[in-house]
Image (cartoon, coloured by chain):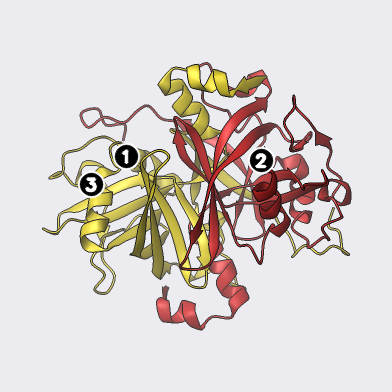
Chain colours: A yellow, B red
Amino acid sequence: MNISLENIRNMDSRERGRLINSAIGFKPATLLGTVDEEKRTNLAIISSVFHLGANPALIGIIFRPDVTARHTLTNIRDTGFCTLNHVSKAIYKKAHQTSARYEKDQSEFDTCGLTQEYHHDFIAPFVQESPIQLALKLVEEKEITQNGTHMLIMSIEGIYMKDQYVSSDGNIDLDAADTICVGGLDSYYECSLIERLPYAKPDKSII
Amino acid sequence: MNISLENIRNMDSRERGRLINSAIGFKPATLLGTVDEEKRTNLAIISSVFHLGANPALIGIIFRPDVTARHTLTNIRDTGFCTLNHVSKAIYKKAHQTSARYEKDQSEFDTCGLTQEYHHDFIAPFVQESPIQLALKLVEEKEITQNGTHMLIMSIEGIYMKDQYVSSDGNIDLDAADTICVGGLDSYYECSLIERLPYAKPDKSII
């Protein structure tokens, strides 16, 4: 089938949201932990996280201020920090429930049954149940003028996980950590390694 | 274990690259098809694609001009268009091989054994073996000054796939399409649906 630009524009908004959100394929499933200026905690699931660079270690996160994770964005702006926690198969339902529109004085840690954890003096709460946890610091916010979304550039300040998730060459074994991924708005997928492939070279085909 | 900012900075660059690229979890595995001004084709695997918004339908792509997919970025700038093709389990090795540094006059379609396909009068080549294909148009390029990467904002102009991959509510069944995902730089994962969850509401917990 061919879905044209005209078809996309004329679609019911919910149908279009589901289609376009699933059109690029799988996305990371992560929980962002923050505090507001009164140290009240917040937790939100988000899939719009992407790699920006390894040196310095930077990631990007897209926010739609009026729609998703509105308290998270405010908290990151106010404090400069958040945590990023991988969603595992054991907690995907609790993680999804954080997307409900709870009031600002309700912590999703409490309403969704997840446990706060703190490392050193980092201000934002980690998710104890999460197998891989990152400490993130706000570097810059950019507005995407085409649709009013905001991109946060965040630096990775620390990574917390079990020793056995990291190979001797630095690669994280996401399979061992039981990290899952998300498709579209609401489909959760478990992943199993097919194969790690060697660095590709023109004169040495792996096909 | 705790990997500190100090540890990350002092790491061997390849180890750091593997660690940081796998730290956010799973990423989409996609092939970008382009042509240069002489209509010579190019194909490159990329995992730094993310959802920007459904209305208008926009996605973002991160490029590191000196390192990855250098011909792809030039071709998109010169022509304004590219295709995005899901990597399926059947073609992941060929898709990975496109990351080798072939010369500009070598088409990865030929060197990696994938088939060009054209839809209507869209200038860029699609990958015939890919289950889900998107036609993309360049909207804007932004430089990320912190590390010299470039973000392209692209609009989705059309989607091509089999009817059975789309649910009646608009969601794409990535499992049926056999789309895979990538972890880090070189680990390919197959995904199977755990569950689709309902829209989360504060007063109706799904936990």
The amino acid pointed to by label 3 is: His
Label 3 and label 2 in one chain: no
In which chain is the residue bearing label 2? B
Residue B73, image x, y percentages:
66, 53
Residue with the mark numbered 1 = A68
The amino acid pointed to by label 2 is: Phe
**What distance separates the C-alpha of mark 2 from that of mark 1?**
30 Å
Residue B110, image x, y percentages:
88, 47
Residue at 46%, 31% (x, y): give it.
B56
Answer left or right for B201 relative to B134: left
Q: Which mark is residue A71?
A: 3
Residue B152, image x, y percentages:
55, 49
> CB of mark 1 within 8 Å of CB of mark 3?
no
Residue with the mark numbered 2 = B81
Residue at 73%, 56% (x, y): give it.
B71
Residue at 39%, 62% (x, y): give it.
A154
Of the two numbered discs 2 and 1 in the rendering, the one whose residue sits closer to the viewer: 2
For mark 1, give the secondary structure: loop
